[in-house]
Image (spheres, coloured by chain):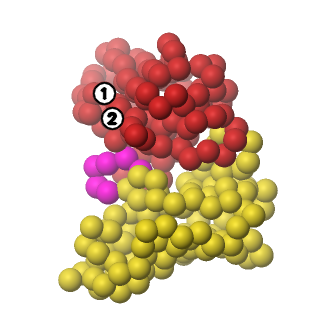
Chain colours: A red, B yellow
Amino acid sequence: DTEVTQTPKHLVMGMTNKKSLKCEQHMGHRAMYWYKQKAKKPPELMFVYSYEKLSINESVPSRFSPECPNSSLLNLHLHALQPEDSALYLCASSQDPGTGNTIYFGEGSWLTVV
Amino acid sequence: GESVGLHLPTLSVQEGDNSIINCAYSNSASDYFIWYKQESGKGPQFIIDIRSNMDKRQGQRVTVLLNKTVKHLSLQIAATQPGDSAVYFCAERRYNTDKLIFGTGTRLQVFP
């Protein structure tokens, strides 16, 4: 089983709203990732969590706030977003941080900011 | 800077033919490479990976070739089927880091 589950599948939010994207995996993976993908572009790394601690932040604006409540869950809190933040947000996980294991992706959450 | 690039943005093949998707990378320190398939509206799906101590790796109908001398990676799909139509990304990961850098992607179109 290589399943990474993301909710919601689609989200429309206003620029003053606060919302969250959720990600869950039960593979025992200890590294989890958030990627952002714009149309017709490759995924771009946003954050990496290793053993529930933030290890990489790719200079992401503070209106995106990640959280890792436990080893199976990863959230992305959204506040005061801009229309240009509309994109597909992908969660991913891998077995052990820093060891070159395969990274498995979820199906993504489509975010539209109006 | 670091980059992983692809030579062709779109590849059109006839059903039953073999497909070859190419990728160039510039970071010689990278030692782990992955090919992903992404269908419309879905997340990237792992296809096959290869480490730098290998030149070739085969899966079911897919083969990945790695040429470290010229920093080139390719994905070969045998007997291409309509279900293979998607965007294919190569990705590079430096060993002992958690950063996965994606190439720009190649769209594979399979015609009957």
Q: CA distance from mark 2 to mark 1?
A: 6 Å
Disc 1 residue crowd, few under 14, some 14–19, many 20+, Cα 10 Å? some
Q: In terms of image quadrants, where is residue A18? A: top left
* Res. A23 mark: none
* Res. A7 mark: 1
Magenta stretch, main secondary structure class: loop
Residue A12 rendering spot, x and y as whole percentages: 24, 28
**For the view shown, which residue lies furthest in the left direction?**
B112
Subunit of label 2: A
Q: Amino acid at mark 1?
A: Thr
Q: Which residues are magenta?
A: B39-44
Residue B76 rendering spot, x and y as whole percentages: 49, 76
Subunit of label 1: A
Q: In terms of image quadrants, where is residue A61? A: top right
Q: Quadrant of the N terminus of chain B?
A: bottom right
Q: Which residue is mark 2?
A: A109
